[in-house]
Image: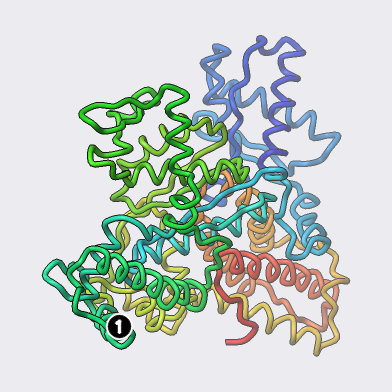
């Protein structure tokens, strides 16, 4: 809808240019948004404020010209009920009833495909997220990044992209040795917690000879065994069974990147392009040539390849698999890593889009105090402990309702509320209420599909129709900028509209069947959109509560 309205405004401006009321000029991007205050129409645009300086006119004067031309054009298409100029030059757009009511027809035709598009047709996206080291259970930060990445993949797929959800398993390098020492409980042990005790006991049970456990080979072998165990017994079950996240690919750094030669292949590419050089016995990549603040080491003086070298090989692996867009979700503590990764991708010749999302820290709070739940994962709270306590629906919704780049205090007290104070229950109750209304309507012999949408004239009905109309734009915008917090916020807003509508408008009235069936048709449409919104964020849509 925003694109359609922007095109209408563009057509009006072009008409003003043709008639000599405006000079020929390069038209800036026309922004059309939903207003924060519902009294200012269904949509608003600030194009007059932006273009006024270019054409040498007062913004409000320009807005009036655009309004007049839109009104002339509207006589043929009857798209707007009215157009107002407000403040310094904002264009407030009130849509015609036929346009608002038309959304019900569209939803009826498309059902849960409403909002789907071919925006991403022909584009292949690699969506890498979580990728936690297999050295312990997933913590709250992993959970936040996991729910974000999973929801983003749902949105991208709805927008027509082919998406591969990928988890990179860092099962090589120093962290594996540290894990080995920890499982062996020697003087170099780093990790602690109940899971380490479990691994230690299992290792003792399956090991027949513990006499040479101080050798690095034994330590590494122990670490590799433990990493595989943690991945398959802790991380993957948590992701699939508790977090409801499905990964298409788990890529092992050791087996898929190092042993298959991707690191060596990347180093050879850098050499051929004369982008690597040797200094003090180490091999470096000229990442400064691509915007990094300093060059990066690929191979140390002792011949050991760095983590960065493996990352270069991993990027090459993604390139060879034909992805046109790479998305990498990382913890905020990895922010400084972005420049070198982007530099490596450019050095390797990646010409697609490479996007980074950084997820900020999470604190678990109750009554203003930080909560420590147990020592299962050492000194951090594991995501599975939280889900066991509040449930997957609440966990997902609470994490997703905030932008990932903001620090988050997870309100455990509110999350444990089993009432409409809890936004998850508030939204789910709205869905269950819609289901109940439709069931009662069927018992009363009312058929929503017979509803005449032209009867929907009440202000609360208009607000609900406008909210439903905005859903496809929500998907398109989020597939572009990854602001997935829009969806749970939209679900809350839609629930608000639904409760207001239901409280103001009598839906089931057998004495006014035509009005009832029109409203029931709106209810049916709203249920489809709310259910789909909840599906996209991975939250259940109950029929009863």
Crowd tier of the residue under label 1, counting other residues whose Cα lies within 10 Å: few below 14, some 14–19, many 20 or above: few
Which of the pair 361/487 is nearer the observer? 361
| For residue 17, side relative to residue 55 (left or right) | right
Residue 304 to residue 297: above or below: below
| For residue 79, side relative to residue 43 (left or right) | right
In this picture the colour scheme is: rainbow
In the rendered image, which quarter contains the N terminus?
Answer: top right
Which of the pair 222/451 is nearer the observer? 222
Q: Quadrant of residue 466?
A: bottom right
Residue at 26% from the left image edge and 69% from the top image edge: 218
Residue 66 position, x and y percent, is: 67, 25
Q: Quadrant of residue 113?
A: bottom right
- What number of labels is visible? 1
| For residue 46, side relative to residue 417 (left or right) | right
Residue 225 to residue 175: above or below: below
Residue at 59% from the left image edge and 48% from the top image edge: 125
Which of the pair 478/452 is nearer the observer? 478
Residue farthest along the left direction in this orientation: 187
Residue 487 position, x and y percent, is: 54, 59
Q: Please say whether residue 423 is visible from this viewpoint.
A: no
Residue 77 position, x and y percent, is: 83, 38
* Residue holding disc 1: 207
Q: Quadrant of residue 503?
A: bottom right
Residue at 74% from the left image edge and 87% from the top image edge: 440
Q: Please say whether residue 143 is visible from this viewpoint.
A: yes
């Amino acid at each position: 809808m925003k694109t359609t309205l922007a095109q209408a405004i563009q057509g009006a401006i072009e008409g003003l240019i043709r008639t000599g009321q405006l000079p020929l000029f390069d038209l800036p991007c026309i922004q059309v948004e939903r207003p924060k205050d519902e009294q200012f129409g269904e949509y608003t645009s600030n194009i007059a404020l932006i273009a006024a300086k270019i054409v040498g006119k007062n913004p409000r004067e320009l807005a009036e010209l655009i309004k007049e031309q839109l009104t002339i054009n509207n006589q043929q298409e009857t798209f707007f009920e009215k157009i107002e100029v407000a403040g310094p030059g904002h264009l407030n757009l009130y849509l015609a009833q036929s346009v608002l009511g038309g959304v019900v027809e569209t939803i009826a035709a498309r059902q849960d495909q409403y909002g789907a598009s071919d925006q991403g047709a022909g584009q292949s996206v690699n969506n890498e997220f979580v990728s936690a080291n297999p050295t312990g259970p997933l913590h709250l930060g992993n959970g936040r990044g996991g729910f974000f990445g999973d929801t983003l993949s749902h949105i991208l797929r709805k927008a027509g992209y082919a998406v591969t959800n990928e988890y990179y398993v860092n099962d090589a390098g120093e962290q594996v040795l540290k894990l080995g020492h920890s499982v062996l409980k020697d003087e170099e042990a780093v990790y602690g917690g109940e899971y380490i005790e479990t691994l230690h006991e299992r290792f003792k049970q399956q090991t027949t000879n513990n006499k040479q456990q101080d050798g690095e080979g034994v330590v590494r072998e122990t670490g590799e065994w433990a990493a595989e165990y943690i991945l398959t017994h802790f991380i993957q079950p948590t992701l699939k069974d508790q977090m409801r996240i499905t990964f298409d690919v788990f890529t092992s750094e050791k087996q898929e990147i190092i042993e298959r030669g991707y690191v060596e292949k990347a180093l050879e590419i850098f050499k051929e392009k004369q982008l690597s050089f040797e200094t003090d016995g180490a091999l470096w990549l000229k990442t400064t040539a691509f915007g990094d603040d300093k060059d990066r080491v690929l191979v140390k003086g002792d011949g050991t390849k760095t983590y960065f070298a493996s990352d270069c090989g991993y990027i090459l692996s993604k390139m060879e698999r034909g992805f046109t867009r790479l998305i990498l979700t990382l913890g905020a503590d990895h922010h400084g890593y972005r420049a070198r990764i982007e530099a490596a991708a450019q050095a390797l010749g990646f010409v697609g889009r490479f996007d980074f999302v950084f997820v900020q820290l999470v604190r678990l709070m109750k009554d203003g105090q930080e909560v420590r739940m147990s020592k299962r994962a050492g000194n951090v709270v594991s995501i599975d402990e939280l889900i066991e306590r509040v449930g997957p629906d609440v966990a997902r919704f609470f994490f997703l309702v905030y932008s990932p780049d903001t620090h988050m205090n997870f309100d455990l007290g509110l999350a444990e509320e089993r009432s409409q104070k809890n936004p998850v229950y508030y939204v789910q109750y709205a869905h269950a209420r819609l289901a109940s209304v439709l069931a009662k309507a069927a018992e009363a012999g009312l058929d929503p599909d017979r509803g005449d949408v032209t009867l929907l004239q009440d202000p609360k009905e208009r607000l609900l129709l406008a909210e439903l109309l905005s859903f496809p734009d929500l998907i398109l915008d989020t597939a572009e900028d990854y602001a997935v917090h829009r969806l749970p916020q939209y679900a809350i807003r839609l629930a608000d509209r639904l409760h207001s509508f239901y409280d103001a408008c009598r839906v089931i009235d057998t004495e006014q069947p035509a009005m009832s069936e029109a409203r029931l048709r709106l209810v049916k449409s709203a249920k489809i959109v709310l259910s789909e919104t909840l599906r996209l964020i991975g939250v259940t849509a109950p029929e009863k509560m």
